[in-house]
Image (tube, coloured by chain):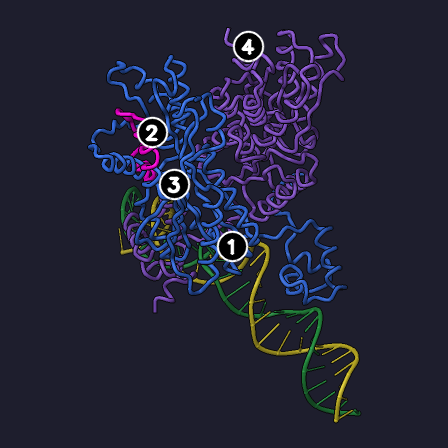
Chain colours: A purple, B blue, C green, D yellow
Amino acid sequence: MADDTRRRGHTAGVKAVAAAAGVSLGTVSNVLNRPEMVSPLTRAKVEAAMASLGFVRNESARQLRAGSSRILAYLMLDAGNPFFTDVAKGVEEAARAAGLSVFLCNSNEDAEREADYLDLLEQQRVQGVLITPVDQHSSRLRSLPARGTPVVVVDRAIDGGEHCSVAVNDILGGELAIAHLLELGHERIAYVGGPLTIGQVVDRRDGARNALRKAGRSEDDLIEITTGALTVAEGRGAGQRLAGLPASRRPTAAFCANDLLALGLLQQCVSLGLRVPEDLAIVGYDDIEFAEAAAVPLTSVRQPRQLLGRTAAELLLDESSNPDHEHQRVTFTPELVVRTSTRGTT
Amino acid sequence: MADDTRRRGHTAGVKAVAAAAGVSLGTVSNVLNRPEMVSPLTRAKVEAAMASLGFVRNESARQLRAGSSRILAYLMLDAGNPFFTDVAKGVEEAARAAGLSVFLCNSNEDAEREADYLDLLEQQRVQGVLITPVDQHSSRLRSLPARGTPVVVVDRAIDGGEHCSVAVNDILGGELAIAHLLELGHERIAYVGGPLTIGQVVDRRDGARNALRKAGRSEDDLIEITTGALTVAEGRGAGQRLAGLPASRRPTAAFCANDLLALGLLQQCVSLGLRVPEDLAIVGYDDIEFAEAAAVPLTSVRQPRQLLGRTAAELLLDESSNPDHEHQRVTFTPELVVRTSTRGTT
DNA sequence: GCTCGGCTCTGAAAGGTTTCAAAGTCTTGG
DNA sequence: CCAAGACTTTGAAACCTTTCAGAGCCGAGC
């Protein structure tokens, strides 16, 4: 009995609606896609039929025939990192303004998952893909655009690819952070970040090295603590390692590749009895909302998060609508926000 | 010239692959879907043709014909809230184990966006929808399952619907929080949360009232501060309001509907010179990772986040694969985690 | 040598929508 | 009263894949 009601496929299609409304298939389709060219009376009849049959357009069929998707995807590096959800907000804002919807995917810093999602999205024939890549050398970053799925790389500048990118100058960001620490008189400075497959981690480190060099010091002076991911948990682990060092060899300042690491580091250090910033000054990166609310408000390098997302989405939209679109590389400038974790309360 | 290369639609289809490999359409399809029933030699030929033509399966066509989607969606209340991204991780874990992919959508506490996404997902004919609803009375929560798209409600228990739900006992959670504050001797207690359209906000408040009643007090003693959303920014706003009150009328404790509010409240109060917990004790809800790392480590009501997501996904999978699936209402129990924001450092 | 089974492969049909050229209807002006 | 033109509506073809009944082929058993 109700067995039939519960199963899929019993949903009415365009054909059933046409029959119920006493019009042809084409007319129903017109009501759906070009309502202005259907007489008000007919339209009302069709709409009534749709409502009473509970018609739901089959998007697969629409897309197959029409050849275009109304969806855009953002493949995030880490959905648990507020930085990326803020970027996603910017993406969504721009997409909505253009009448598109956004699907979010989370690679979770796993290259295999990233590859799986890229394949899936290409098969889905989405309008375009925004991505903050784990693996910026993935062949898919070239093959998707080559086959017709526009790709925009977010928060990363990748040269030569068949795509636009929107980034913040991470090298400069690293320089700002270290310059600030040097100015405060720190001698032994650590860089906490990893894995090195992630572009941001490398660029920020290189920026840090630059700053040391510019200050007349060897870039090898940077004490590198490599983590397995950019998470709070890994930050705690790094804290454990740092706090375990004898005070004479322990760095007096740490620059973290992102705020999650910094927050974890901070938390662990405090709970192990180190004072921040007296025993250890900490600089984070991203300036997420929680950085300011931390146990010791965190000095951090701020990036224009929503703007990043919005700009990326706009480039993507241009690429898929503008026939003579040119690939661009937009770069924003980061800004150092100084708080207690380096400056102290003075 | 290259104009042709850049446009969509030039991707090779099953037909082209069949021609290139010198086999029929059916065989190519078999290689794709039942490789074991194709001879190794033929399979190799077909795979070579696919690789050289850069064949990408058209998922719309597949889905249209096969009638099934390999995708499952989680429509989140707020992607910027780490609580929900943790739930999403649980969802993804379970989905991946079953060979499905997850698309994340963010309603951002906006009922209209929620409705739009539900329509979109239904049109996409996804395998099923997991949702933490803004509007738990949305007609779509009934119509989707009625038409064949399974729905599971996450972090909310909704009665009588045509769907499963997985929730944490929010009433109990509210009771735990207030009982704790009463035990510490607080008299004037505020509840910070809103809007009241969100189920969790109401349940947690009702739990708070229960606790007051059980302690022999009037439930009207609860000072309600209604916010427009469950965000850090709104929490700051609430802090502003609270701190503005004369000390004699100001509550001595605040229970917030979630940790974001609590963190915002905490941050604002501290920066306005109130001491936590001496002047104002604060209890949050969710126990997100940042609660522990806050300026004053936050007492909070912990929920089993990943488990929630995993269980929800499993129920959904059961619903779409098991013919005699029964709708269930799973409820987990929350747990109070006491930290400095109420207990002090003693 | 013939039949039977098992293994591969084939090709037409189907799935729900959009498109588009053509047909139909109505109004207006001569 | 007719022709032209504007506005609506029609229905077959196309989109790309999967499915499935059946054809072809080969070796085994009698």
**Residue B182 drawn in magenta:** yes
Q: Are marks 3 and 1 in contact (CB under 8 Å)?
A: no
Which residue type carries mark 2? Phe
Q: Circle 4 sits on which residue?
A: A343
Which residue type carries mark 3? Glu
Q: Are marks 2 and 3 in contact (CB under 8 Å)?
A: no
Q: CA distance from mark 4 to mark 1?
A: 54 Å
Given the image, what chain letter belongs to the residue carrying mark 4? A
Q: CA distance from mark 2 to mark 3?
A: 28 Å
Given the image, what chain letter belongs to the residue carrying mark 1? B
What element does badge 1 sit on? Answer: loop
Q: Is residue B228 visible?
A: no
Q: Nearer the viewer, mark 1 or mark 2?
A: 2
Which residue type carries mark 4? Arg
Q: Nearer the viewer, mark 4 or mark 2?
A: 2
What element does badge 3 sit on? Answer: helix
Q: Circle 2 sits on which residue?
A: B255
